[in-house]
Image (tube, grey):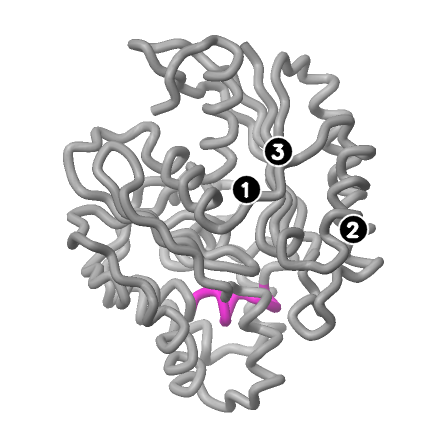
Amino acid sequence: MKVAAVDIGTNTVRLLLADAINADGSVRLSGCERFEVVTKLGEGLDDSGVLGEAPMNRALAGLREYSHLIRDGGAAAVGGVATAATRSAANGADFAAKIATTLGFAPRVIDGVEEARLTFLGATSHLDMAAVCCVIDVGGGSTEFVVGHQRPEYAVSVDIGSVRLTERIGVLGLATPAEIRDYVDELFAEVAPPAAPTLVLGCGGTFTTLAAVAVDAVPHDVERCDDITLTKDTVATVVDRLLGMSVEEISKLPSVAAGRAEVLQAGVICAERAMIRVGAAAIRISTNDILDGVAIELGASVTGRGAT
């Protein structure tokens, strides 16, 4: 059965088309096709409290293209989520209504804990979950931490991500990398997992781009980054390299997709500090994330099988 899942994030809108297959009493995904458009939906939100017309129009344009792909793909079940930007904006409900008109179905505007749960489900869906796992997802507007064994047991969402931190650096006058790191550490201080994870997964565009830079992958070959492991020292080296470059220089890197350069430095600082906060000596990159979680639950809702 074909399913279509949409994620309306702070920096990107994304689509996953996949076949949901019943396997051993649970739903698995195969034949995954992934699409992404950088829209910078959250641009200016941190200062104004509302979504701007231009960012909303960029997001709706991307979603309009997705509506055609969903129709042509023959999806039997469709669904979507809107995350940090939409849930925190004063005009988020109005924007969600526009999304529903554009796509033909209404997305769920979810809170940070639900975002973390779905991310955990998607990121761990293909793993043998014998170990305690921590999933970290650095988004545009928030960073999710979720720890569990088989299922989430601890989840927290911190309202900082690549877009939000990029804008705050100027507003708060954070002049050096050390000041930015200290600021992010203060925000992540609330993160206190109840158990030390034996496996740490990093998902989302910041982590996959960080990995792509580390291994010199190109954006259309992002699957090459799936399941690779980066040590803490490797991450620190890549972060320092990126912080020593201008945005223009970053934009010319073959590993950085169009539209990501402006927020990548802030994003990788969040990624680095998140790893340090949970005591990770290394992190495994996962291209499976919240989209996979949404798609799995769509498949489960139709088949009546469990989502694992």
In front: label 1 or label 2:
2
The segment highlighted magenta reads 261-268
The amino acid type found where label 3 is placed reads Gly
Q: Tell me if 225 is positioned left or right of 60 in this view.
A: left
Compared with residue 280, is residue 147 higher up or lower down, i.e. above or below? above
Q: Is residue 4 magenta?
A: no
The amino acid type found where label 1 is placed reads His
Task: Name the residue rendered at 39%, 22% in the picture.
Answer: 307
Q: In whole angstroms, how far apart are the C-alphas of marks 1 and 2? A: 21 Å
Compared with residue 147, is residue 35 higher up or lower down, i.e. above or below? above
Residue at mark 3: 80
For the residue pair 217 and 301, the one nearer the viewer reads as: 301
Q: Position of residue 4 (x, y in %)?
A: 60, 24
Compared with residue 102, is residue 217 higher up or lower down, i.e. above or below? below
Q: Tell me if 167 is positioned left or right of 292 in this view.
A: right
The tally of labels here is: 3
Residue at mark 1: 220
Q: In whole angstroms, how far apart are the C-alphas of marks 2 and 3? A: 17 Å
Residue at mark 2: 58
For the residue pair 233 and 6, the one nearer the viewer reads as: 6
In front: label 3 or label 1:
3
Q: In whole angstroms, how far apart are the C-alphas of marks 3 and 1? A: 23 Å
Helix or strand or loop: what does disc 2 sit on? helix
Which quarter of the figure is the N terminus placed in? top right
The answer to whether residue 36 is seen in the rendering is no
